[in-house]
Image (cartoon, rainbow, N blue to C red):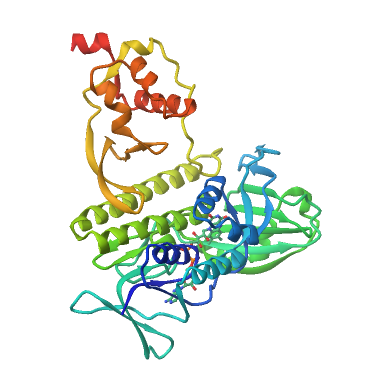
Amino acid sequence: MIDICVIGGGPAGAIAALELMRFGYRTKLVSLPSRHRDWPEAVSPQLLIMLDRLGLSGVLAHSVHTEITEKRVKWRSGKESGKSLSLGGKIISRDRFDRALVVAAIAAGVDYVNGAAGPPTQQSDGTWQIPIGADGQVKVCARFLVIATGRRNGWFGSTIAQGARSIALYGIMRNCEMPAGTMVVGTADTHWYWGVSLPQDTYHALTFVGAKRLSEAPIALLERSLPPDTKSRPITFNGAADATFRVARRAIGQGWLRVGDAFIAPDPLSSSGLYIAVLTAIQSARVINTILRRPSDVLTAETFYKNTHREMAAHFVAATASFYLSEESGPVAKVEPSANSHELSFPLSDLILSPSAKLHLVPTLTNDFVVMAPGLVRSNKPPVVFVDGIPVDRLLAPLQAGGSLASAVSEWIELAIPSRLRFVQFLLENAFLIEKRKKRNS
Ligand SMILES: Cc1cc2nc3c(=O)[nH]c(=O)nc-3n(C[C@H](O)[C@H](O)[C@H](O)COP(=O)(O)OP(=O)(O)OC[C@H]3O[C@@H](n4cnc5c(N)ncnc54)[C@H](O)[C@@H]3O)c2cc1C
């Protein structure tokens, strides 16, 4: 009997296994070689930081094709924008990235099994039996199960397609003569597309179409997704894959949970799939650690994971819908409010805490466990428990004691100045601050 069996060795499964091994659990990673075609994928600066914190920058260095040096956005209206925008992201080879992550997991002590897992069965004592291989003769026994099988797995309540089924067509053009690192995103009437030029003069194009449009030849669709300065070269069709936005019906149950695409497989336009894979891998390891080491906190850990799933799904559904509804909208990006976009019409000393700013205990990730911690709760949005790692209750204490915002800000010495401004902005936008005068009148 082992502690944890992770099924699926993509980024989500490999990182979850690695983190669980670091917590001291006997962990097995069972995976089929990826069916992923080795198209390039974009990694955001935010994800680069996360990988660095996990000690995985070496994995990244091994997988990078190029930095993103320029981004071109072409809207349906024909308008172009965003030229020469420095993004700080990178383009990676998924094949190299996935293999390097599995190597890192094995080096950390994870037992890797190359094979297909069949549907797991739960025993009467709550443990799992997982058949491996074509005949299912080899059985792995584990206390906990991590489902990291990607976007189409139907175990444990399946995934729900959000909107129409969509397919990604992949093509490569040689001798494109574009500077490496030029990323192109565009919308047309029938499809949207993404492409990037890599070293060795190749241009890699992905065209995203509704499954119903597949009557049209892939090459024709790919050709209509090319930037004007590359069109003279022929493009070769290199394969297709499902790209439908899917959300799992259930994220966690007794003795199991889902991570990565098996949890939420976002529309690829968001370029957030890898971010979700890494984030859920990190979170899931802490959730499992809490469940297995602190039995009295099982409910807290499960609630945290369910809340995360609900909030993330709501965010991506809303962001994707707004992209498709808007003629000019750009690829989805979570825009942080700018610290100085909110004009203050009264001095900070006139602002005090609103009675609506209540702290509630909410399930939260802290270090290696999920615990209950005080957070500022907003309707339909995730609670705020930390600001740059500082507990929100500590920051609000001067205001709760009746002080003004001016006196509170002067006590936030732990918080960098831009973060102080952002936090003030957040309190104002959520009406967590009111004018002293209003309080007296009300
Ligand atoms: C066309 C396209 C372009 C994309 N571009 C980007 C991008 O630019 N940036 C970005 O961040 N994201 C992008 N994504 C999303 C990203 O690829 C996924 O979010 C990411 O692969 C999810 O990782 P994962 O580990 O959850 O799943 P996967 O990478 O799918 O890994 C699942 C693994 O499980 C294995 N497996 C499945 N079933 C079993 C079984 N029964 N037994 C054993 N093993 C099994 C599979 O072989 C595979 O190795 C894109 C997606 C698509 C479709």
The answer to whether 241 appears left or right of 165 in the picture is right
Query: In the image, is residue 349 above or below residue 163?
Result: above
Question: Can residue 111 be seen in this snapshot?
Answer: yes
Residue 69 picture quarter: top right
Q: Residue at x 49, y 36 (%)?
A: 335
The answer to whether 248 appears left or right of 198 in the picture is left
Query: In the image, is residue 420 above or below residue 221?
Result: above
Residue 438 picture quarter: top left
The answer to whether 271 appears left or right of 292 in the picture is right
Q: Nearer the viewer, residue 426 or 221?
A: 426
x, y percent for residue 57: 58, 55
Q: Residue at x 33, y 72 (%)?
A: 155
How many numbered callouts? 0
Residue 249 picture quarter: bottom left
Placement of the N terminus among the 4 image quadrants:
bottom left
Q: Nearer the viewer, residue 370 or 99?
A: 370
Placement of the C terminus among the 4 image quadrants:
top left
x, y percent for residue 195: 66, 54
x, y percent for residue 34: 53, 73
x, y percent for residue 402: 23, 17
Question: Can residue 225 be seen in this snapshot?
Answer: no
Q: Residue at x 67, y 68 (%)?
A: 237
Q: Nearer the viewer, residue 283 or 89?
A: 283
